[in-house]
Amino acid sequence: MGKLSVNKKHIDTILVLDFGSQYTQLIARRIRESNVYSEILPWDIDEKKIQDLNPKGVVLSGGPNSVTDSHTPRIPQCIFELNIPILGICYGMQTLAEQMGGQVVSVDKKEFGHTSLDVENDSVLFKDINKTINVWMSHGDQVQDLPDEFDLIASTKTAPIAAMQHKNLPIYAIQFHPEVTHTQDGHVLLENFIFEICHAHTDWKMDDLISSRIKEIKEQVQDNKVLLGLSGGVDSSVTAALLHKAIGKKLVCVFVDNGLLRKGEAEQVMQTFKENMQLNVVKSDSQETFLRHLKEIEDPEQKRKIIGRTFIDVFDAEAMKLKDIRFLAQGTIYPDVIESSGSESKEARVIKSHHNVGGLPEDMKLDLVEPLRDLFKDEVRKIGIELGIPKEMIERHPFPGPGLGVRILGEVTKEKTKILQNADHIFIEELIRADLYNTVSQAFAVLLPVKSVGVVGDERRYAEVIALRAVETVDFMTARWAQLPYEFLEHVSNRIVNEIEAVSRVVYDISSKPPATIEWE
């Protein structure tokens, strides 16, 4: 299958070599925020891929392993042979030190959280940064002895060697995480590495990106037709708008309404894309099909699989009715590619199988068009706004692929779906009205598989229980429950119980991630 290849031969690239840190994607995003292109590759990737990338510099990410164990990840030799600047972060620092002759030890007192860092010697890495800063640590190992030819830059109370640099080569290493917002002036440190040390150019800009993508789509597709499964989510919506701008009516969108969308969402998708933006959209009303397949199914993983499989069946049936389709477009974005990139790594560390990557039939005759496949979500949103997609659609909170199917705990029915749609709508409507929607990262209602006694008017009501969930997070890896005002929660609870007869009680979820996940299923 052909893929839209993005031409980056002429732009400066910072490689992020991934050792398994939960923050790896954040490093690449921070670099891109400085208008420099960054790409993530697994540490054990084929060395030719690294050489072909021809990076201006490389950042070694953190990771969960200990360099004191045998057979843990190491920096490939070709990184040193490229003679380019290197910045090791956390595990990246430890393996760098160990590979260059220093000594790393496991410590009794692990450092996790905020720590005060003292800059002891001048370094271009710490240019325009105070001598004492607050940094974010997360490690159980640390460098005990500097490798030969290295100087100490900074230390903390528990880590005497918290930053180091080579005497002659542009090789730097730090024990803390500059990519997280908790580290003071972390962005300054990264920019010092990118611009002062790597001398990278700012080639990665959104306005240039749209015109270059349109050109690439035209070159790939030419006069052929393209099929796209439009879900109404951010990724597929931006893919649709971008393709429409490039090839107009040669794009055919199929919108499968599975009946598990938010209240009014199906109508909004059709109005935005078919009526307002004049896209060629075919709608498939398939709620009954999905409900029939979900009947008596309670296991969340089984529900996910059934919803995914049914979507493909319905989509295929609609696609069969169309003639002369040569390409299939997908809203695959960069995190999907990274998380499903086990095939590129010898260790095959697949985090999850994503429905946009690797879930397609082997015998599919269509070539793939994936114009967003190297973009992060925040970059996709910026493109969407530029292309005229309504802000309320682009800035909407994340919504799971299986929709309300995994927010109705237990069996999914038409009645339960309607109850949840109405409760969720009230919650979101009130968040927007109270100007709280953009202060939380994700908010939604969940229908619990229990009933509870309530009293409404003079009547006893034995009815459903709704849980409200709202979280604050930067990267969705960790999240804290949002401390919404009590008066607000009381008002939302009153509205839900008074306006939805089938609900007698509302509870608020105060679990953080970890130990809980953001979604309930």
Image (spheres, rainbow, N blue to C red):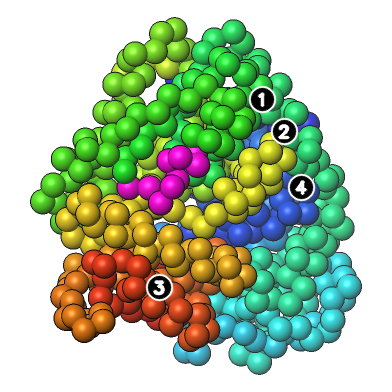
Quarter the C terminus occupies: bottom left
| Residue labelled with disc 3 | 495
Question: In the current view of this chain or complex, which residue is farthest to the bottom?
Answer: 157
Determine the image quadrant of residue 334. Answer: top right
**Element marked by disc 4:** loop
| Residue labelled with disc 4 | 36
| Residue labelled with disc 1 | 245
**Element marked by disc 1:** helix
Magenta-drawn segment: 260-269
Discs 1/2, front: 1
- Residue 152 percent location from the top left of the image: 76, 78
Q: Say if mark 2 contacts mark 4, CB within 8 Å.
A: no
Lower position in the chain sequence, tag 2 or tag 4: 4
Q: Which mark is residue 210?
A: 2
- Above or below for 348 versus 299: above
Q: Is residue 219 magenta?
A: no
The reply, left or right, for residue 291 in relation to residue 316 is left
Q: Marks 2 and 4, Cα distance to the nearest angstrom?
A: 16 Å
**Element marked by disc 2:** helix
